[in-house]
Amino acid sequence: MGYTITEKILLSHSRGTRSIAPGDFVMADVDLCLGNDVTSPIAIKEFRELGFDRVFNSKRVLLVPDHFLPAKDMKSANQARLLKDFAEEFKIDNYFELGEMGVEHALLPERGIILPGDLMIGADSHTCTHGALGAFATGVGSTDLGYAMAFGECWLKVPETIKIVLTGKPRKWVGGKDIILHIISDLGVSGALYKAMEFAGDTLQYLDMDDRFSICNMAVEAGAKNGIVPPDKITESYVKAAIRKYKPSRKTYKAVKSDKDAVYSETREYNVSKLEPVVAAPDLPSNGKPVSGYKNVKVDQVVVGSCTNGRISDLKTAASVLKGKRVSPDVRLVVIPATQDVYREAVKQGYAEIFVKAGGTFCTPSCGPCLGGHMGILSEGEVALATTNRNFVGRMGHPKSLVYLSNPAIAAASAVKGIIAHPSDL
């Protein structure tokens, strides 16, 4: 009996383990452990209580204060300072200060820090984003992060795997965000509970890494333990370019793929060739339906950004829709690039100027309003359309506000029309 890619990675990182099966508990060595300004303070407290005077590997601990920087208040400033002081004290190589910081799940792949075949944990639920590189990456609690920073290991339960086979070439304006929203609307928010979602099929040849990151990012919205894409030429090209540019401390890796006789809990097939852009209605990411199904839904705010859709291809798409147009006077448009590299490229390519000329705002890299943080919080009764990953009650502000989820093209068109719209409506 063969193994899935997820099982292979877990097996190779579990000392003394000769075989593995879904449901097994393993103590796995971690290649990387990640924390941000929301989750790291608790982890640091737990780490200090263990009495350690060093982390297990100063090159493998990653600290990214991306949620509330630039600091929105005294509490967020104190939390960010706690990370900075810890990084200085324990000589953490991969600590990213404001000015080079970006949204963690976009920044780390961009820098070539996480590689195919890696096992990564992060005290953030969307750590599963990194599975797009053919790595096992999953979210954990802050106490697990604190332990991992000290010992370099973490216990995990081996998940069953759902194989998601994607077929067909996506239409124009349809990307990874639409594909995953469609899948989640079929599975439901617990349809993949504590399972791995492995993505396969001929559609992958049409999906660049940005699309794949979007897909794996939202695997957790179906309850999955991790999302993963077996590495291919597209993955290899992306990783090699990142290594050449940033020269990370680790440059070698071993790509892993599932065995032909691997066992899956189920296989689901989706033909995406006829899929139109999908919009998820409040208050769950599973409430997705084609954009054509929304009529005269007014929006007060549009947000383009986040670890789901804040990369340069996302901003390029939004800019292509907005060029030469004006945002509706009844709408606030907030555009937040995911990293400093994305910010610089957006300026260089003229996308930033398009956003500003259209009447939008172009902000510094940050998670911003995605989690109800800052830079665009909703008041009572307001409606937002966002390229973020969650639209739970009160996610972006007031409990009586509403959030719809979409891809960047739909977001941009809706900012112009003032209602949920398709670019063809312009």
Image (cartoon, helix red, strand yellow):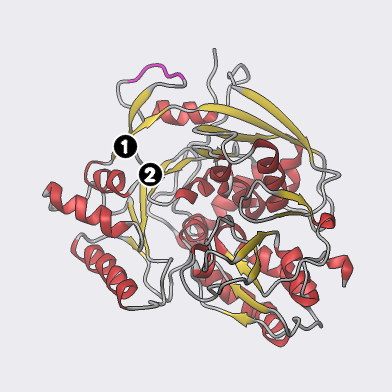
Is 98 on the left or on the right of 89, as rendered? right
Q: Which residue is mark 2?
A: 140
In magenta stretch: residue 20: yes
Identify whether 305 is placed above or below 129. Answer: below
Q: Residue at x 65, y 68 (%)?
A: 384
Depth check, front residue: 156 or 403: 403
Instruction: Determine contact: label 1, label 2, CB under 8 Å.
Output: yes
Identify the residue at horizontal 52%, vertical 62% (top origin): 394
Crowd class of label 1 (few under 14; some 14 to 19; many from 20; radius 10 Å) = many
- Whether residue 354 sits left or right of residue 362 in the image: it is right
Kind of residue sitting beneath label 2: Val
Quarter of the picture containing the N terminus is top right
Query: Residue at the spot x=29%, y=38% of the render?
Result: 153
Circle count: 2
**Among the 4 quarters of the image, the one containing residue 321:** bottom right
Which type of secondary structure does the marked residue at label 1 adopt?
strand
Question: Which residue appears at 37% of the width and 47% of the height?
Answer: 32
What residue sits right under mark 1 in the picture?
Answer: 154
Q: Which residues are magenta?
A: 17-21
Q: Residue furthest top?
A: 1
Q: CA distance from mark 1 to mark 2?
A: 9 Å
Mark 2 Cα shell of 10 Å, populated few (<14), some (14-19), many (≥20): many
Helix, strand or loop: magenta stretch: loop
Please determine whether, in this image, residue 326 is positioned above or below residue 114.
below
Q: Position of residue 308 (x, y in %)?
A: 59, 57
Location of residue 184 in the rendering, given as x and y in whole percent from the top left corner: 65, 42
